[in-house]
Image (cartoon, grey):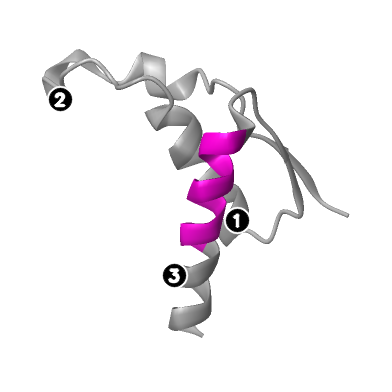
Amino acid sequence: MIAGNGSRPRPAQRLPAEHDLPPLLPGLGTAAAVTLCVAAGVSVVRVHDAAQMADVISVAQAVARSRS
């Protein structure tokens, strides 16, 4: 079993200011981290907003399946 932690990732909060991006929507950084975990083959991901991230995981898995 490979485990990952997509729970409120800090790197998304430290994007360089020169990117001039709007503030991240709640959960967007978590969704990105969870998607990367799925792409890497992680089988268990710890998150706070499990219902929303279940949808993210379903989409990420469908995309991964379509690419193979």
Q: Is residue 59 magenta?
A: yes
Disc 1 residue crowd, few under 14, some 14–19, many 20+, Cα 10 Å: many
Q: What type is the residue that disc 1 sits on?
A: Val
Q: Which residues are magenta?
A: 51-60
C-alpha gap between disc 1 and disc 3: 10 Å
Which residue matches tag 3? 63
Q: Residue furthest front?
A: 51
In terms of sequence position, does the residue under pointer 3 or pointer 2 come before the other? 2
In terms of sequence position, does the residue under pointer 1 or pointer 2 come before the other? 2
* Image quadrant occupied by the N terminus: bottom right
In the image, is residue 56 above or below residue 33?
below
Residue lying at 44% horizontally and 70% vertically, measured from the top left? 63
Residue lying at 44% horizontally and 81% vertically, measured from the top left? 67
Q: How many marks?
A: 3
Nearer to us of marks 1 and 2 is: 1
Q: Is 33 positioned to the left or the right of 4 in the image?
A: left
Q: What type is the residue that disc 3 sits on?
A: Val
Residue lying at 60% horizontally and 56% vertically, measured from the top left? 38
C-alpha gap between disc 3 and disc 2: 27 Å
